[in-house]
Image: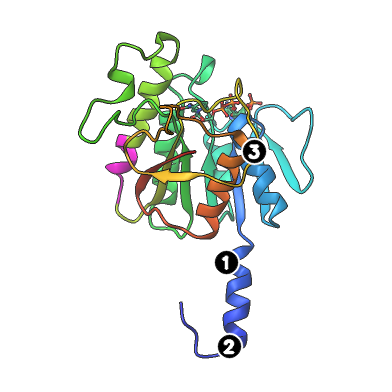
Amino acid sequence: MALADGRASIIATKETLMARITIIGGTGYAGSHIADEAATRGHAVTSWSRTSPEQPLDGVTYRTGSVTDGDTLTAAVEGADVVIVSLSPRGSMLGQVELVVANLANKLAGTATRLGVIGGAGSLQVAPGGPRLIDGDQFPDAFKAEAAELGRVLDQLRASEESLKWFFVSPAAGFGSYAPGERTGHYRVGGDVLLTDDEGQSDISGADLGIAIADEIERPAHHRRRFTVAY
Ligand SMILES: NC(=O)c1ccc[n+]([C@@H]2O[C@H](COP(=O)([O-])OP(=O)(O)OC[C@H]3O[C@@H](n4cnc5c(N)ncnc54)[C@H](OP(=O)(O)O)[C@@H]3O)[C@@H](O)[C@H]2O)c1
């Protein structure tokens, strides 16, 4: 926003850059990469998880509690400029992530706080207008329940109140803790269609996903939209 007074503009710019970021699941694979990148850039990062991390990151404040508990969820979002959900609907959290996001959507609608959800590649289309990855024969059965729940989370966000400031990220299909990769500082951004490279691969490292999310936090480019990140 243009300000009449140059000094005020500099202060406003600094305030924009120093965001208070809550990462729900900030000790997990995606969440810890986002926490690391955001804290390194000087943001005030608070991570919530049920257990403490074995290797805490410098500059990150760790809080413990389950966000399936309403009071814990309220405490987690208190004072945050941006809330990132990096929960995985696996094990005891299967069926719970969509409830947590619904609860957050209710809490944050009409507020200035942005809600960013780290989802999956399964709900991406294989080609414009084409089927979703999850609907193809080759999608692994082991990931179907997780991908289906995250697809419902996206639908839920799309149907949410207009006053909710949300974005949803589908990482590349090959993203995951089994393929952490390297930090390159490069990535491409797409919309609802899977991004692949010249060899048909769809990948992004943990560190580069962290960069993409920190960039989105600092320079919001996706309002009430899903985007995908890949090489
Ligand atoms: N290629 C792909 O599409 C792809 C691949 C991988 C992941 N993903 C997506 O990325 C997102 C994150 O996945 P991830 O692999 O990074 O997950 P993860 O490593 O399993 O991390 C989950 C995080 O959530 C925390 N958590 C779980 N239940 C919680 C609760 N009730 N309250 C508070 N914290 C809780 C965990 O810590 P505690 O256990 O200590 O609570 C941990 O910090 C998911 O949506 C996943 O589907 C997509």
Task: Decide: few, some or many residues near mark 1? Use Cα within 10 Å; few <14, some 14-19, many ≥20.
Answer: some
Residue 191 placement (x, y as % from top left): 34, 43
Three-letter amino acid code at the position of disc 2: Gly
Q: Nearer the viewer, mark 1 or mark 3?
A: 3
Three-letter amino acid code at the position of disc 1: Thr
In the rendered view, how is the structure colored? Answer: rainbow
Q: Is residue 148 above or below residue 220?
A: above
Which disc is residue 6 wearing?
A: 2
Task: For marks 1 and 3, give the CA distance.
Answer: 21 Å
Residue 85 placement (x, y as % from top left): 52, 38
SS for tag 3?
helix
What residue did someone put label 3 on? 33
Task: For marks 2 and 1, give the CA distance.
Answer: 15 Å
SS for tag 2?
helix
Looking at the rendering, the stretch of residues picked out in magenta corresponds to 155-161
Residue 175 appearing in the image: yes
Please say if the residues under marks 1 and 3 sit with CB atoms less than 8 Å apart: no
Q: With 116 as the anchor, is 208 left or right in this view?
A: right
Residue positioned most to the bottom: 5
What residue did someone put label 1 on? 16
